Amino acid sequence: MSLRVLKHKLASRPNLSPQYGVISKITPTIIYAKGISPSVGDIVKITHKDSSQSLGIVTLSDGQSFGFNPFSFVEHFGINDIVMIEKNGLTFPMAESMLGRVFDPLGTPIDDKPPLLESTHLPIITPPIRALKRGIIDEIFDVGVRSINGLLTCGKGQKLGIFAGSGVGKSTLMGMIVKGCKAPIKVIALIGERGREVPEFIHKSLGGDLSSTVLIVATSDDSPLMRKYGAFSAMAVAEYFKSLGNDVLFIMDSVTRFAMAQREIGLALGEPPTSKGYPPSVLTLMPQLMERAGKEEGKGSITAFFTVLVEGDDLSDPIADQARSILDGHIILERALTDFGIYPPINILASASRVSNDIITKEHRELIQKFRRYYALLKDNEILLRIGSYQHGSDPELDYALAIKPVMEEFLKQAEDDSVSFEEALIMLKAVFALPQSELMQNPNT
């Protein structure tokens, strides 16, 4: 194809500008071009010498030339490849028929099914809900997990983090929440995870049922740009269904991979590294994504669960710290609990829901306080109990905690395929303390 024919073909496209530039310099992370003057954030389309095309986003400009990060890798890019501005920016095709489908961050189906028909393209970067437009969180969000429903009660529109090291059970808990929650729409973003985990998550964690679910996938072998914008695309999909009046469950796995992608991009652009090499833009980007979840007046809600991978189970990681400061609660998964056969391994004492007190009854709140108190007593005296130094009768409260310990541990356990409603969880929580303390003290072997 001659350059003249190519220029005419490209210029005739309605979503592209008639002007074009050419690539002048290629580095391992940023590609430079000249001839046009796009703004930072514009999406450019590159036509290669073999007539194939790819996309990039403008990240810097000095007046004479500009630099962009490609959504693919730099292979196949060449000097003098044609670059044009895509006027509409980075958008995602939206339609109610996207339920049950799997897409990449650019909206391309990756499930071997045809593209969406009659879809509306909406931008993936939008401002968060304005503070005074947010609705009050006053309804319980049933997640189907007994320990969360009973002790860490969630509300519609709440944002929570699931913090855990590798291999502790984040994906399993995600699957339990997706299968057990009452939300009519579920949007799941799998960002930076192993490609093997995608079909496993669909078939094992979701039971192969995607009827009310949309998956946005950017695996670890995708470019940093795809991993970064995969999270924003998924949030835009959740916002689309929220605008239709739906209560949406949004789950993202994981924030850490998303932050790592922005770290690669930021360092390539010359940002100074801070703690653990993360540039300042990472800490700025996280609230721009997370604050888009919530409950909005006159519309539906987005209840969000963000998983955070903590390296070496270290909760002082900068990404974990930043996430906890933004979110409305945190669920800590503890590796040691798996040794005792407690699944999901939620550390109740280290976890918290910041809105639970506003949406549960006084009786429920007192039950949670009792559970945490007696569970904490057992943890504080664990060493004494293990070595046999504690004598029954020395502390009546500890004796009572020991008597109900098996029932408390049973309450925390739940099989992966089980679903326990909020009402059932509350009944079971009351049953933990069904036997009065005075009766247990008279019959310690009960």
Image (tube, rainbow, N blue to C red):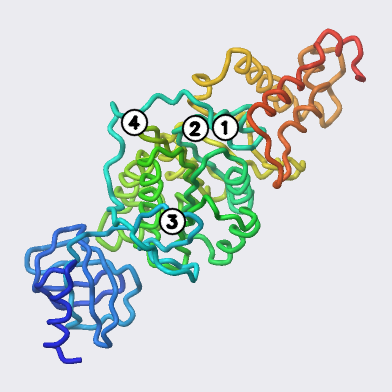
Lower sequence index among marks 2 and 1: 2
Image disc number at residue 329:
2
Q: Quadrant of the N terminus?
A: bottom left
Q: Secondary structure at mark 3?
A: helix
- In whole angstroms, how far apart are the C-alphas of marks 2 and 4? 25 Å
Lower sequence index among marks 2 and 3: 3
Image disc number at residue 351:
1
Residue at which label 4 appears: 298
> Looking at numbered disc 3 in the image, what kind of residue is underneath it?
Ser
> Looking at numbered disc 4 in the image, what kind of residue is underneath it?
Gly
- In whole angstroms, how far apart are the C-alphas of marks 1 and 3? 37 Å
410 or 124: nearer the viewer: 124
Lower sequence index among marks 3 and 4: 3
Lower sequence index among marks 1 and 4: 4
Lower sequence index among marks 2 and 4: 4
Disc 1 vs disc 4: Cβ atoms closer than 8 Å? no
Residue at which label 3 appears: 97
For marks 2 and 4, give the one nearer the viewer.
4
